[in-house]
Amino acid sequence: MLLCSRSSVYVFLKGGVFLKKPSSNPFSMLSSLSDGYRLLLITSAVTTILSIVFNYLMPQVIRFAIDTVLGDQPSALPAVLTSILMPDKQDTMRNLIACAIMAMVFSVLSGLFTYLCRYTMAKASEGMIERLRNRLFSHVQKLSYHWHVTHQTGDIIQRCTSDVEVVRGFLSAQLLEMFRTVFLIALSLLLMFSISVKLSWISTAFVPVVMLYSGVFYAKISKNFRKADEAEGDLSAAAQENFTGVRVVRAFGREAYEIDRFEKKNNLFSALWIKLGHWLSFYWGIGDLVSAIQVMVIVILGALEAYAGSITLGDFLLFSAYNSMLVWPVRSLGRILSEMSKTGVSISRLNEILNEPEEDDDPNALCPPLDGDIVFDHVSFDYHGVNPVLNDINLTIHAGETVGILGATGSGKSTLMYLLDRLYDLPNDCGTITIGGVDIRNIRRDYLRRHIGFVLQEPFLFSKTIRENISITSLQNELSAIRHSASVAAVDEAICEFAQGYDTVVGERGVTLSGGQKQRVAIARMLMQEAPIMIFDDSLSAVDAETDAKIRSALKQATNKRTTILISHRITTLMNADRIFVMEKGRVVQSGTHETLCKENGVYRQIYEIQGTLEEELANINKEVTP
Ligand SMILES: Nc1ncnc2c1ncn2[C@@H]1O[C@H](COP(=O)(O)OP(=O)(O)OP(=O)(O)O)[C@@H](O)[C@H]1O
């Protein structure tokens, strides 16, 4: 007999059904996001260069005014420009005004290109981030059920919000800043070398020091950012779990424990950020010192050079201006690198989700009619490869039949239904499940799930109106059809008693339904699906025996020709089924009608007798307390 593990399922899925893993390289992610936005990015880069060039022309105008207009240095400008700037060398005022106009024109052009580069970058980055968010959401929708049950919701939300926000920050600000910085450094050095080679070498000597220092810092800080991100994910998960489970917390008086748990996680998160803050402060402090030394050295040596007449006063001022302009880009390169390290961490965390293989069907997958017999043939399964949850299951459910499945908790009833719905895929060598003779592995997942109505053990309702909740599985949303399904599920009357009736909002934003009401709304929702196969996984457990009987009888009439599978611990829920399967430790140990099973000396009769005795005792108690 074959026992199958999750890992082998995974291999099978990776081998045939799931998509290939995308690359985990951060640059390839950014590159794939930039498809269709490259022209905007190039425009942004070009306008950035132009804005810097015009900005850098400003000190040139000042030097020109000092050396040539006010002083007596010959103009180094081409004759055409000289004739515009200084039509009359003797008229100082007119020449100064011409310089002022040039300065104004350069400022306006620099401002205009700054606007253009920022606007185009914002447009490109927001488009890329919108694409990333959509890609993430649609990818998460297509991930396996197994992935969802094995990952914390809080952590997934944190990645899809905070980590996306970090990437957004990088794209909208840091990317342009990085390009701008590199260009500024190159241009500053070029201009400085054109003024004084000697002073330029001295100034340049500081650049590798700051770069190396930034690089070391980058390596050091990267893992701390990852730890902080993970701690934030943990914190979000703890809060989300607590808010979702608020009833359990209150019922068991666990508030103090939960507060303590949250505080510990919060402390860890804060401690990690304090550590990061410490490193960042250290970095900026040392960076400030190095920059101040660089400026000071250049001012002293430049002044000496100007005093000695090696360079003009205008050159000295111009050189000092470019040197100061160099200091900031070099400094901010470190900041950008640290931001990049944060972005790299966030991208790798997002890639961890995006690299998860999607549930995807074979292109040749079928959409056959699903109103045939359901056959489980030698089906074995387990989740972790340790103990088998299902062990060589062989059973046939005839089309249109109502079957009941009874078994102790953990006997594998739900797992059997998860396999039928392909929430978990049955590995190739672990038996087969067929519907109407077609192996369900060859049926399109979405088609199969649309044709199997499944009321889960713990129904989930969206924070919408009852009407929207019920009609969510169907294209039609006429009130008459919705009310019909609700009547079959014996919840119409209860809904009409609400002030807003079917327009009552349920869940977090509205009314809290009782467990039984929730189950019945979930049944009504499933009935709207009009699926040929219906599964009720212990979905009448929260309703009283009388309502249970009422629903079953209404269901029988409304869903006459459909295959119905009822899972329950309560024999009264199953006793009218055409056949009942009894499961024990992953095996089917008995099958038959209620009558035949009662005659056999087995688990079914034992449970029936226990439940019968209990019911009798309850009836007697009720009689005694009723006057
Ligand atoms: N996603 C999962 N990962 C690992 N083990 C699981 C998973 N789901 C269920 N199991 C285990 O598989 C076994 C069968 O679970 P299943 O939910 O199928 O039982 P059940 O008969 O429906 O129980 P109940 O009547 O309590 O709902 C249990 O031991 C359970 O712990």
Image (cartoon, rainbow, N blue to C red):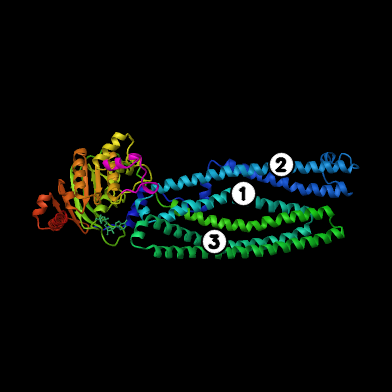
Q: Is residue 195 above or below residue 524?
A: below
Count residues near mark 1 (Cα–Cα under 10 Å), then give few for <14, some for 14-19, many for 20+: some
> Comparing marks 2 and 3, which lies closer to the viewer?
2
- Name the image quarter holding the C terminus: bottom left
Quick one: 99 or 447, which is closer to the camera?
99
Quick one: 332 or 245, which is closer to the camera?
245
Count residues near mark 2 (Cα–Cα under 10 Å), then give few for <14, some for 14-19, many for 20+: some
Q: Is residue 86 left or right of residue 45?
A: right
Residue flagged by tag 1: what amino acid is it?
Leu
Which of the labelled discs sits on residue 45, or is there none?
A: none
Q: CA distance from mark 3 to mark 1?
A: 21 Å
Circle 1 SS class: helix
Task: Identify residue for label 3.
Answer: 222
Residue flagged by tag 2: what amino acid is it?
Leu
Circle 2 SS class: helix
Residue flagged by tag 3: what amino acid is it?
Ser
- Residue 78 appears in the rendering: no
Q: Where residue 361 appears, x then y in whole percent?
A: 35, 44
User: Residue placed at 58% from the left, 65% from the top?
Assistant: 278
Please report the bounds of the magenta region as a residue range.
493-513
- Name the image quarter holding the N terminus: bottom left
Q: Where residue 483 appears, x then y in whole percent?
A: 28, 37
Task: Identify residue for label 1.
Answer: 176
